[in-house]
Amino acid sequence: MKALNATLPTQGLLNFKNLVYLDLSFSTLHNNFLKDIGKISSLKILLLSGCQLSGTIPAAKGLCELKHLLKLDMSNNDLRGTLPSCLANLTSLQQLDISSNHFIGNISISPLGTLTSLHKLQLSRNLFKIPISLLPFFNHSKLKFLDCHENEIYADIDVPNLTPKFQLETLDLSGQGDGGVFPKFLDYQHKLEYVDLSDIKMKGEFPHWLIGNNTKLYTLHLPSCSLSGPLHLPMHSHVYLSHLDISDNSFNSPIPTEIGVQFPNLYFLNLSGNGLIGDIPSSFGKMSQLIKLDLSNNRLSGIIPQDLIVGCISLFNLILSNNNLQGQIFPEQANCKELDRLLLDGNQFTGSIPYSILNCTLLNMLDVSDNHLFGSIPGWIRNMTFLRVLDISENKFSGTLPSNFVPPQIREVYLSNNRLQGPLTNAFYNCSELMTLDLSRNYFTRRIPDWFGKFPKLSYLLLGYNNLVGEIPIQLCNLGQLSLVDLSNNNLSGHVLPCITAASNKVRQEEVGTNPYMASSPAYMKQPLEFTTKSISYYFQGSILKYISGLDLSCNNLTV
């Protein structure tokens, strides 16, 4: 049924006494509808998602009279209050979806515990209090799908030694809360396919037995669960598991050497923020279907194993940031034709940028900042035609910039805190898509090129702490999107351009839609921009940059 913008007159519907299926989703209904719907006592399926219903569910009348109801969907409304006890009358109900409302109350004392015919129950995005033991549902022998994410999960004080009658296939309790210990009812589950307990604090080690007991499990999400102890894997290989996220826990142990053999069909693996130590196992090369691998923010050491780069032929994102990895940043042999993001920042890599990265023909983002790389910047980077973000800041690169060394579609370039020198010549001459250019804290000389005025989308220009001379080119007045400009600590002379001053004082539009260039800005923009004012350095990154304006011309020879 097509959604109606006006309030739907429902009086006539109430005359259809034999109606069994009614779908009014995304229509606008009067609140009295929930009181009157009981007149259609034959209803078996009632769909009221997105109907702008508000207030509480009427007690005793209306919904509570639909004793033949098999499926009820009241999601995406503005319903609130506790669930009325009369809902216990709906003993035939098999599917119930009341997600995305404002219901409150403890599930342990709600009527849901009596609806033992339920197969599928969706309570997500409400204000319920739900015990992590799921004790209220232990008699629901038919329950297979339970979605409770974005409610408050709490630990039971005393849980009886009972075995649940259900065998769940999908379980989502993610959101917030302190669950105490890892839930014991999961010991008895053998048909799980999807489990998400994200952001629930629980004591215990990584539950490798959960994977071993459920041979069809394909997704396991346990990030930020306060798990600790060594990271153990199940005894046998698990061929169904495709998504594993156990980031931001405290394992503080090596990655098991045979992880690639144990989980050969993983698509997504996130082990970031766990204090992991030791080398990156070469068995990762066995994961030929791996799309995303995130090992960032650990204490891993050693080199990037060549087996990883050669064997993971489907790899789209490789994130190894903030570890203690050493050696060359990329093996000489590489089979990474699908790679889109390569983040190696915050390590101890040495040497130059290897030519093998050019094999990553679809690379969109390359971040090797904050390492110990040296040598000159290779001119072949211009051949990486899909590259949009290049960050090689905070290294020891030297020499001059090659002419046109970046592809013309580049959007963000970060070269700060290196030892680059010489004139800027035409390094970025044809980069019409450029939005961020940070060349600060190097040794660049001569004038700011006039062709800087040909970057119509340029918003952030940082040239501070170099040896630039001459006047500020008037062509910068053509840059209508400039919002953050740092030309400080150079040897610039001449007059301050009024247009630059006006740009620094402009009020940024808070709606991205008013700025077509900002609307097309890439989602990452994760690199922080350093901006100094009154001798204090500030770092801005992410979406906050949309609202920042600034101009620093200090420590030059300029006149007003």
Image (cartoon, rainbow, N blue to C red):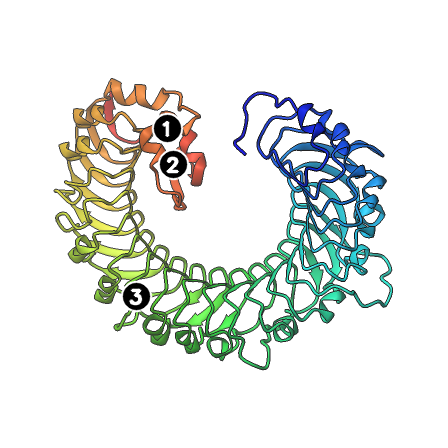
Give the answer, above or below, for where 196 lies relative to 430. Answer: below
Residue 74 is marked as none
Q: In which quarter of the image is the C terminus?
A: top left
Q: Name the residue under label 1.
A: 550
One can see residue 260 in this view? yes
Estimate how packed mark 2 is, as few (under 14), some (14 to 19) or many (20 or more) residues with alpha carbons within 10 Å: many
**What whole-number distance in Å separates the C-alpha atoms at marks 2 and 1?**
8 Å
Query: Which amino acid does the dot numbered 2 rest on?
Result: Phe
* Quadrant in which residue 203 is drawn: bottom right
In primary-sequence order, the first of circles 3 and 1 is: 3
Q: Which residue is drawn at 49% across and 60% down?
A: 297
In front: label 3 or label 2? 3
Asked if the residue at tag 1 contacts the one at tag 2, i.e. Cβ–Cβ closer than 8 Å, the answer is yes
Image side of residue 511 versus residue 9, left or right: left
Q: Residue furthest bottom?
A: 235
Give the answer, above or below, for where 256 lies relative to 273. Answer: below
Q: Name the residue under label 3.
A: 336
Q: Where is residue 415 in the image (x, y as percent from the top left)?
A: 28, 48
